[in-house]
Amino acid sequence: MPECSVYYQPQSMADALTLLANSEGRLKPLAGGTDILPAMKKGELRDVGLIDLSKIPDIRKVSIQGNVIKLGSLCTFSQIENSPLIKDEVPLLAEAAGTVGSPQIRSIGTIGGNIANASPAADTVNAMVALDAKAKLDSAEGSRTVLVSELLCGVGKTNIQPEDAADLDLQGALTLKVLRSTVAHAKVKGFDVTEAMKVPGVVRVFTYEDIPGINGYGIIVKDQPALTDKVRFKGDALALVAAEDEVSAKKALELIKVDLEELPPVYDVWSAMKEDAPAIHDKGNIQLISKIKKGDVESALRQAEVVISRRYTTQKIEHCAIETEAGVAFMDEDVLVIKVCTQNPHYDRNDVARVLGLPMNKVRIIQMATGGGFGGKLDISVQCFLGLAALKLGRPVKMNYDRQESFIATGKRHPFFIDYTTASDKEGKLLAVKVKVVGDTGAYASYGPATLIRAGVHATGPYEVPNVDIEVLCVYTNNPFSGAMRGFGTPQMAFASESQMDIVAQALKISPLEIRRRNIVHEGSITATGQKLEGSIGIGKTLEAAWEKALQVMPELEARYK
Amino acid sequence: MKKRGYGIGTMWYGIGNTASNNPAGAFVDILDDGTVTVLTGCADMGQGSTTILAQIAAETVGVCLEDVVIVSADTGVTPDAGASSASRQTYISGNAVRLAAEKAREPILAKAADVLNIPIHTVSLKQGEVWNGDRSSGLTVKEMITKCRSEGTLTLGHGFFNPDTTKLDPENGQGKPFATYAFATQVAEVIVDTETGLIEVTKIVAAHDVGKAINPQSVEGQIEGGCAMGLGYALLEEVIIKDGVIKNPAMSTYLVPTSMDVPEVYPIIIEELETSGPYGAKGVGEPALVPTAAAITNAVTDALGIRIYDLPMTPERVIAAIKSAKEEKSD
């Protein structure tokens, strides 16, 4: 037998869980031992002690309650394989259990160990996933029930240890769900929540009238209500339901009656910019116009050897971070604590405090392990909802967007319409660029102004351009809103400006490499905004290094560019 | 027919928020046993800022990476570090942590200079030891901390950093929007099937000037991930909206690149040190993605001799572009 530093044999589940909770990872539970003992033998688990679960009563049973079959975590494969109940009701699982290892392995290996170790050879796990089996996980802090399919994250990896915000389960936490608008543009005249409140388990329905502070948030412009009194897109948040469970909350959503006075919607930036367009916000639909001007573009265009003008369009895209928006909230005496996935905890704090009318130091945002952001978690998503319900109800609350809600209710990459004119002399030296960009920010500004201004500042690409005339517009429409996304308008601009460079090069019969060599910025270059570049300017080195490597790994490249 | 093409995309990217103050703060506490606690508001959502900040703290205090614990993104205990956006945290929070760590180590340097009876500017702290010029003195950092603490001197510091920028003139946009810029060039190789319109990206070379690469493996990870995301932007991804309704709000209908779509990426790290950055660092988070769609677009044009002006370059768009080019020729 392998060496083991400490060995416990608790007589009850409670004792086992206490041991495990206090072990700081130094103790491992021992079920059948078919994975852990070989690992110890190989020396992979040095200094690890064992908690032998074999003496704990009642975790070796196969039973049926109603239409649910319960398997104790210490049920062995041969027990499952030979159980008449399993063979009759879920033959798939019996068959799967029968394929595990050898008879010797099957008589000691357990289904609990099979799941917990996430071994790629875990034959019963596929069956359990197919059967939508759920696992009940116990710890000293409490228990939770998770789909087996959601428990497995990869080879040898599970999320049995709660980590992400969605995995947190506070004792007695209420579930929150948002009623979202199905019309694009409307005034909210009133709500009738009578029927919704009759659903057993529903604790409260909140609307804009329940917002205690200033009902508007936003990183740059505070134009987005937490719960709205005016609908601006199909997906705008109208009401928030707090219920004991998700089913009741969803049921209540269907029963809330909203009295809306519909307004004409505007779905494209060109209609939105017309003078007689219906105003989505009080100050009109053009949220921002920003200009960058340097030199004399018109005279440069007249002197140029080549002038290229093109229209480019780019699409709206979604971040698709692996984790959707989620969080929990509770009151810690008089401090509202919100644990949430976020890229922007201090901003979250400031706007939650604003919307709820709390001092900033009475709101505590704790970032949970966050499964990717890419800009999608810079904005408020679930934070104000969680805060409002926890504050008003004095109970812990939780909420988790599913993928569809994540698509509909959070910011996207701005679609751009780019009119780009480039002027060059006959050597391929850029003389001027003239650019107009219109970005569709949808119903709310979010990071729109920052995206458009950054797009303008970067519009020339990393090139010396003596004359520039750049204009960017950020425009409201009744589309789902656009916000921050990795690159903030510069991937759109690179698509346009780099296309332009190749078109100019082709017109002058210069190679794409050469035209870039002739125009890239260097120490002392002046940018479109008049900034003199100093210090670290490695564009030339990246150009040469990338080309050299490309010649090595792309064998046909050299012939092409001869 | 399958046609091969090559394209270049370059980019520049200002580090930090555009033309606005965007400071970050940090606290560093060097504890009795020589370990270090860093408090920073910087949210790590998988990009690795916590590791980077730990490396910077370890380097500055002169202890091992394992001796640093980062407490991050809890407004109850950590100072404001601004958003984890705009590729700003390595540069801005990195500087804040460096400055806080420099402040926290001041009494240690002073004590070491005192014990060794040498001028303070010749003392440095490296990997747990006190150095005198280019030699280890034999004293440990831990001994010096213990001495400071036993004499009632705490070894803690705070720091904040705000990049040197100006507002842009509202009339003509002139000003200094960023203190420093990252740069990159990517070269893409594609094969376009003229029958089906399918574009296969076969290789991407991606050279990025990130300043000092504090964690080269993490920089390479960013570059590879950025190329994958840029490929999705160029070829696959589009939130389809009709009358204000998102028609494809699901992973089954909204296509992101899978491992079958992502080509071999050759990351190249160029380190043009930025004097205002922590140990010369700038940033890479967003730059990794910025030129990819541009490079792929130019490669597709090289392959087909036809340019597409709208993203994403779906098979339908490619076929339509080929068809309309043929029609133009025959006219």
Image (spheres, coloured by chain):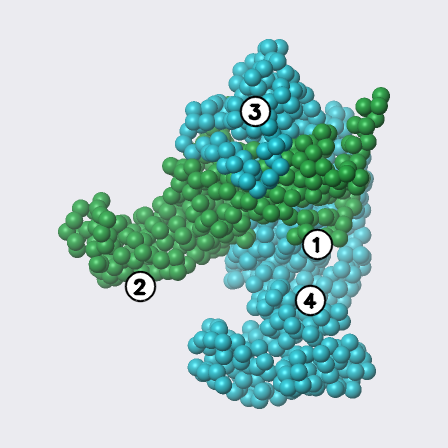
Which numbered disc, 3 or 1, marks the residue closer to the eye?
Answer: 3
Q: Is circle 2 on the same chain as circle 4?
A: no
Nearer to the camera, A78 or A238: A78
Disc 4/disc 3 C-alpha distance (Å): 53 Å
Which numbered disc, 3 or 2, marks the residue closer to the eye?
Answer: 3
User: 10 Å neighbourhood of mark 2: few (<14), some, or many (≥20)?
Assistant: few
Asked whether the beta carbons under mark 3 and mark 2 sit within 8 Å of each other, the answer is: no
Residue tagged by mark 2? B33
Earlier residue among tags 3 and 1: 1
Disc 2/disc 1 C-alpha distance (Å): 47 Å
Image point 78% across, 32% down: which residue? B322
Q: Is circle 3 on the same chain as circle 1?
A: yes
Disc 1/disc 4 C-alpha distance (Å): 16 Å
Q: Is circle 3 on the same chain as circle 2?
A: no
**Amino acid, disc 4:** Ser
> In the figure, is residue A88 to the left or right of A395?
right
Q: Is circle 4 on the same chain as circle 3?
A: yes
Find residue A421 and report its horizontal and vertical position in percent: 64, 21
Q: Colour of chain B?
A: green
Give residue A149's mark: 4
